[in-house]
Amino acid sequence: MTDVTHQKWWGWGVEGIAFHHEDKPHFAPFVLEKIGIDLSQPGTPPPDFDDIDVPASRLSDQLGAALRAAVGDHHVVTDDMDRVVHTYGKGMRDLVWVRAGHLPRVPDVIVYPATEAEVQAVVDLAVEHDAVLIPFGGGSNISGSLTPPAREERQIISLDMGRMNRVLEIDEGSGLARIQAGGLGPDIEAQLNPRGWTMGHQPDSFKHSTLGGWIATRSSGMQSDRYGDIADITRGMRVVQPGKVLVLRPLPSTSTGPSVREMILGSEGRLGVITEAWVHVHRLPENREVIAYLFPNWAAGLKAMHDISVSDATPSITRVSDANETGFSLATRKESSSLSSKVGPLLFDLLAKRGWDMDKVCISYIGYEGGAAKVRADKSTVGKIIAKNGGIKLGKGPGALYDQKKFDTPYIRDFLLDRGAVGDVSETAAPWERLGEVYHRAIKATNAAFEEIGVKGYVMCHLSHSYHAGACLYFTFGFPPNPDGDFLEQYDVVKRAIQQAFIDGGGTLSHHHGVGTDHAPWLEQDISVAGVDTMVGLLRSVDPKRNLNPGTLIPEHREW
């Protein structure tokens, strides 16, 4: 049996870690007011795994024997728990289905390779036996990229990359590291940091996602303003395809026709299995701190983020929450008797006396990294921009708290599901001049969807990942479904509304969660019909029999 660890079969993260509200005195009143859920009533825990009816594996004796010969007996697994863990990612639909025991198609076998040669053998066996192969990293995907097609009759292999998690070498002169694709975020940093290096890539899923998964979905991290998105960080790759290995050397730039590197980025397993990559690494910063600021309203916060993006300052994080998300953040504070905990209410009272509308204030977090002189200069420049846009500094305390809790938010979704409520996210990116319209369209569309299905819902947003031309807007929404309707049908009404608002407002269907099956319906509107034609042609050229993760990435009606 393999020693690769996985997330909970029914939810986010590992057993023993969950969201609790008892130490957050403002949270229960907030939830009751905003979406009408009484947290004094106990939730319904996930079912026992023994109560789940798991379809039997369809693995043939012939393919099973060939796989065991390729990777070893202990690394070919067909037990029910492992198969269910590899059936879904962690999207809302995934979690609802797995809790309900809805398992129309489950991988027939999980294979754990340790080398690229073993990956090649498994890929070739999948093609030889006309099986389906789905690469699996940390299982954190939330856009439907891991789910086997329900009507797939062929044998399905889940290729878990968890054993391939090593930093293989560091080119210190070039600032590059060669890393196996199965390395989780903490695994990678634990190997880089003692040698004085960091990738600096920290998505929300950092603890439970892999380098290969980041590349396959074009991931972004919280510190992308400084370190870049994974598309910027990744310079070279090795990708196993049927009968061959695609090799891209780690060049700083090249003019060799259409970028094959860009074709692999975001390909979600459809162009092969990424086994390793050369990525940018940086020396650990001499100083690092996150400072919180407060703006009188959302427009002021957006303007400040744009001004920072065109200034001489180069912060690692530029983030501002709208009023609804600011209210949510304040509601999740823990109770404390310390003097610092009393400063917030006193400050808010003072600002209210000065004329601030405290229902409209927006909290912001700015990260600074580097030598002492650089950090001082960046803080000075940013401070002037904050002040020019009417903002004030809250200090390091709230910033440090954000930094400590930045990976905890996904656990709230399971907490809400226990109480029969939806909590999910959608994110987009748009030019600076379009951000305001995208934001207002999305908020209006989401609230209209709540009204359509007859529920009391809540939607909030933050800006993150600033670029020269625009930024990412990240929306979170929650509601208790109408008991007279279907849970997922109501969810789809809200999800469709917000996604269509992105496209109609001039944004993209997704900034960093990828396409999968959830976002594929908007792909033709996003990149044009001709763009999808090009993508289909590319997929056909590499995978003519549709053995590599079919059903994801392109709209269902375009699957050939």
Image (tube, helix red, strand yellow):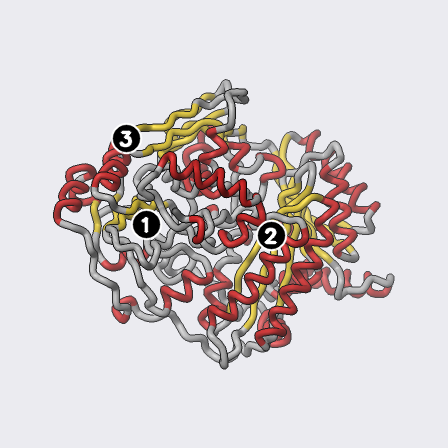
Q: Which residue is mark 1?
A: 5
Residue 120 located left or right of residue 173? left
- Look at the image and tell me whether residue 195 can be seen: yes
Other residues around mark 2 within 10 Å, as few (<14) / some (14–19) / many (≥20): some
Residue 11, image quadrant: bottom left
> Helix, strand or loop at disc 1?
loop
Residue mark closest to the camera, 1 vs 3:
3
| Badge number at residue 243 | 3
Residue occupying image coordinates x 68% and y 34%: 314
Spatial CA distance of label 3 from label 2 is 47 Å
User: How many numbered circles does the render carry?
Assistant: 3
Numbered disc 3: secondary structure: loop
Viewer-nearest residue: 161 or 382: 161
Front-lying residue, 224 or 442 = 442
**Would you name the residue on which mark 2 appears?**
402
Task: Kindly state the secondary structure of the residue where label 2 is placed.
Answer: helix
First of labels 3, 2 by sequence position? 3
The three-letter amino acid code for the residue at tag 3 is Gly
CB contact under 8 Å: marks 3 and 2: no
Badge 1 amino acid: Thr
Alpha carbons under labels 1 and 2: distance apart: 27 Å
Where does residue 199 sit, x and y in percent of width and height?
50, 34
Left or right, 284 with respect to 77, comes to: right
Task: Give the foreground label among 3 and 2.
Answer: 3
